[in-house]
Amino acid sequence: MVDIRSGTDRALGPAEVEDVELYHPHSWWTRYVFSQDAKIIAVQYASTAIAIGMVALVLSWLMRLQLGFPGAFAFIDAERYYQFITMHGMIMVIYLLTALFLGGFGNYLIPLMLGARDMVFPYANMLSYWLYLLAVLVLVSSFFAPGGPTGAGWTLYPPQAVLSGTPGGKDWGIVLMLSSLILFIIGFTMGGLNYVVTVLQGRARGMTLMRMPLTIWGIFTATVMALLAFPALLVACVMMLFDRILGTSFFMPAIVEMGEQLQHGGGSPILFQHLFWFFGHPEVYIVALPAFGIVSDLISTHARKNIFGYRMMVWAIVVIGALSFVVWAHHMYVSGMNPYFGFFFATTTLIIAVPTALKVYNWVLTLWRGDIHLNLPMLFALAFIVTFVNGGLTGLFLGNVVVDVPLSDTMFVVAHFHMVMGVAPILVIFGAIYHWYPKVTGRMLNEAMGQLHFWVTFVGAYLIFFPMHYLGLIGVPRRYYEMGETAFVPASAHTLNEFITIVALIVGAAQIVFLFNLVWSIRHGREAGGNPWRATTLEWQTPETPPRHGNWKDLPVVYRWAYDYSVPGAPEDFIPQNQPGPDNLTRETAT
Amino acid sequence: MSAPTHSPVTEPLPRPSGLAGFAADWASDQRTFKNVSWGKAMMWIFLLSDTFVFGCFLVAYMSARMSTVVPWPNPSEVFALHIGGSDVPLILIAIMTFVLISSSGTMAMAVNFGYRRDRRKTAALMVLTALFGATFVGMQAFEWTKLISEGVRPWGNPWGAPQFGSTFFMITGFHGTHVTIGVIFLLIIARKVWRGDFETGKRGFFTSRKGQYEIVEITGLYWHFVDLVWVFIFAFFYLW
């Protein structure tokens, strides 16, 4: 068909990565339960993450019920409210978003998109999931432990986290929370090493790093960051566990509790904040970078255009990843640290806006004059862009010390981080599920249910979080069980709270439609075929759909980048990455 | 589409120079680190992550020690042993450090003999390394016992800042755990080498996969890392 000896093919070196010997399961148990196949592990990760995420969703309902109708529900007392708020935050950030992006999408997409048969260490990959499941079970068990789960807030700041005034502080709650985090980190490390080594050392012939789809770049960079950031959380968890169990004083200053002088003395609560946010800020980007990557691929595929400025997109991901390690103390402007630190961290924080804005411009320029298909993945991708810009702009407010100090601990902060790292990545997750579900199951998700889900979720998210900016500006504090008789909060704020609660219940209900769609479409969805989106990347070129164990018959050979859409002169509007062709039939050199 | 046939590379492609060339080398085909196996790459990246764990521990220790307002126990007195009628400062820790550094030497020799496919010497040197490691952990247990008998606890000690005991037990304990895991790992691999598993292609008990002699070197990487961490712990706890 095409003379493959000319042009692109010449750049292909000999096979450096020998074909691997796979472990072939012998029974139903090793095939579907204790599976070493990254695709099964991905589905296990994703299902567990979504299940625990539903718990966090219900917790947010309960919180909103209290905020919208204070005192109307007798079982939500102040202690329970703090437990709900803590568990909601921790589950959403760590056990849902991190696990779903890296454990779910990472496991499914890395081997397939890179043309590998599996992850490089399938056995460790399997252990990674089971440790994650154990971490989730330990977390869930705290709901049933005496005293209930911890109510320390998702940041778990000492000293209050281990004192008796906080729910779970002197009971099981905080111990189970910290243990669960330690298990999660150990499990994640096993998976994370797999993802990184697979990307670095296990690619198909022709798949240079600069030909990888941006999805992989996002997941890869986020995993590297996670491997360097989670150690700080591990150390903080171990030390707080010792403070709680052994009576050490790492984070505990001399303190009087309930009129009684405790045995602690000389510890530094600020040290915990530094360790926590050295993890906590990269964590924001551990969640955001895979979303950036995935959304780039969704936009390119569904606008039938190559991504604008691929190289700059890659460098922006790497630069954001690196910068995010030197901004952590912008979460600590009100902690009483040296004002010069505030100056430094405000500067680095605002510098991150540069590569981030670059990415937003490139997404918009990819859409510019594209052949935009307004299907579900594209709708979610567009929703992500606007939501991320909205959330990012309020980040510029909060990044400045003088603006942050009055806004700190108000609903403005809640609105900001929910927009930028709550709603925005979740929208990408939805878009990605609508995009890749046909590959995982062989069937399309139902379009009508999907449209309902999208519009309720997208519009609802704005109705929930936009008013919160206003609430924050008039000074409504976050994490308060009730306002009581507060002079500066007008009565209209309470009306607004009621409105937000009602919308939150509706948006939550829309997620049940989505879950139903996921289950219903497995049997009743439209047959998808191998490449329903006419996409270029390798996962759509597998011989079977869903891909079998080992993914490929012969390992694919990559001849081009991932974005050859609408190439002038090509017979179709996409050219798969594994299709050889003359040099002039590619847009790879365009960027 | 017919299956493509590949022609060998006939002439080197033009390569970019400077920073672009640097980036192109890293991004090159299939493997970023040429001739580095998956296992070895994994161990290096794991050690990088582990470095951050120990780094955070040590930074926390330094921050506690520098910000404390009560006296810090004097290391040359606290870690002294009473031998032959006089207190010898740091004698135990000197021996411990010597043992651990020696174990790095025997480990390096084991790696060398491993690549020469000398099963007996490789296994013997790995067992010797493990013995050195076990000796180190044993002496650490002795030191812990001595300190505990003198009244040092994680929550306090007779001489000053309570953070002395807590950071000491936590960080040396965490390092000792690493050494212990290393000893177990060394003994398992030594047994496999001795049995000739890597010649016969015997499959692992858990993973059902064949091992390779390279695992000796990967174990060695971990072992040298644990030694290197000890140098920092030694400097920050005993010499500061």
Image (spheres, rainbow, N blue to C red):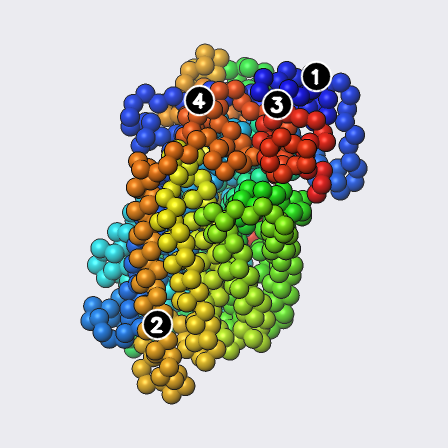
Circle 4: element type: loop
Task: Tell me the residue that label 1 is attached to.
Answer: B8
Q: Residues within 10 Å of mark 1 (few under 14, many from 20)?
A: few
x then y, percent, for residue A36: 39, 29
Picture quadrant where residue B180 is located: top left
The amino acid at mark 2 is Phe
Quarter of the image that includes the N terminus of chain A? top right
Given the image, what chain letter belongs to the residue carrying mark 3?
A
Q: Is residue A419 visible?
A: yes
Q: Are marks 1 and 3 on the same chain?
A: no
Q: Are marks 2 and 3 on the same chain?
A: yes
Task: Tell me the residue that label 2 is attached to.
Answer: A499
Q: CA distance from mark 2 to mark 3?
A: 60 Å
x then y, percent, for residue A248: 38, 60
Q: CA distance from mark 4 to mark 3?
A: 18 Å
The amino acid at mark 3 is Glu
